[in-house]
Amino acid sequence: MQFFLVFKSGKARLATFPPQEAERQLERRSIVYEENLGARDPRSEDKDLFKRKVREAFLKKIPVRNCWSCRYHGIGRYEDLIFCRLRKDGVSSNDAADCRSYQPYRNGDEAARAEKANEEYVRKSGRSILDLDKLLSGES
């Protein structure tokens, strides 16, 4: 069984447990939110699922602190890292739980605009990550 979990720390993760062990694992006191996603599909992209679940949780006001819900996240050249436009470095999405500069989106529309800008950045070759700031502010 696959679960989306949010912990007291604000960190989130996808976890897979055998059905007979799931109940014991989910009794941990550090879990503030759990969602049973059913049997894990080995063909699915966990990274896309995780990103979607973090955003859904954030919009439902579940206390998740993740870079996917921060206005400073960008897309870098890293396979598994998010490019933090403030730090100018690749970070794990759960770094937001301990980040003093974490700035969550105000709403789903703001998150959607930022994601569109990130996607536009990816489509355009030869642009520096600093140009993403211009895209997000509506310039060029």
Image (spheres, helix red, strand yellow):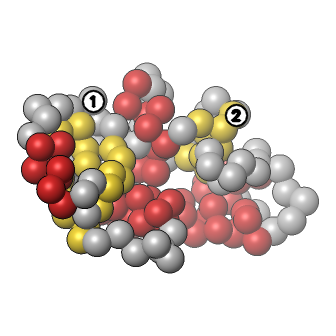
Instruction: Give percent across and percent down for residue 25.
Output: 18, 43
* Residue at screen point 36% across, 47% down: 13
For the C terminus, the quadrant is bottom right
Instruction: Give percent across and percent down for residue 81.
Output: 62, 45
If you read the primary sequence from the N terminus, does the residue marked by circle 2 or circle 1 appear first? 1
Image-quadrant location for residue 1: bottom left
Q: CA distance from mark 2 to mark 1?
A: 24 Å
The residue that label 1 is drawn on is: 9
Instruction: Using the image, tell me which numbered label, if any, was put on residue 88.
Output: 2
Q: Is residue 58 visible?
A: no
Image-quadrant location for residue 137: bottom right
Q: Is residue 115 above or below residue 75?
A: below
* Residue at screen point 10% across, 50% down: 23
Instruction: Give percent across and percent down for residue 129.
Output: 76, 48
* Residue at screen point 44% across, 59% down: 51
The three-letter code of the residue at mark 1 reads Ser
* Residue at screen point 62% across, 64% down: 117
Near mark 1 (Cα within 10 A), the count class, few <14, some 14-19 or many ≥20, is some
Callout in the foreground (2, 1):
1
Q: Is residue 118 left or right of residue 46?
A: right
Q: Is residue 79 left or right of residue 21?
A: right
Q: Secondary structure at mark 1?
A: loop
Near mark 2 (Cα within 10 A), the count class, few <14, some 14-19 or many ≥20, is some
Q: Is residue 86 above or below residue 116?
A: above
Instruction: Give percent across and percent down for residue 27.
Output: 9, 40
The three-letter code of the residue at mark 2 reads Lys
Q: Is residue 36 left or right of residue 137?
A: left
Q: Secondary structure at mark 2?
A: loop
Residue at the far right: name it: 126
Q: Is residue 96 visible?
A: yes
Image-quadrant location for residue 57: bottom left
Q: Nearer the viewer, residue 33 or 57?
A: 33
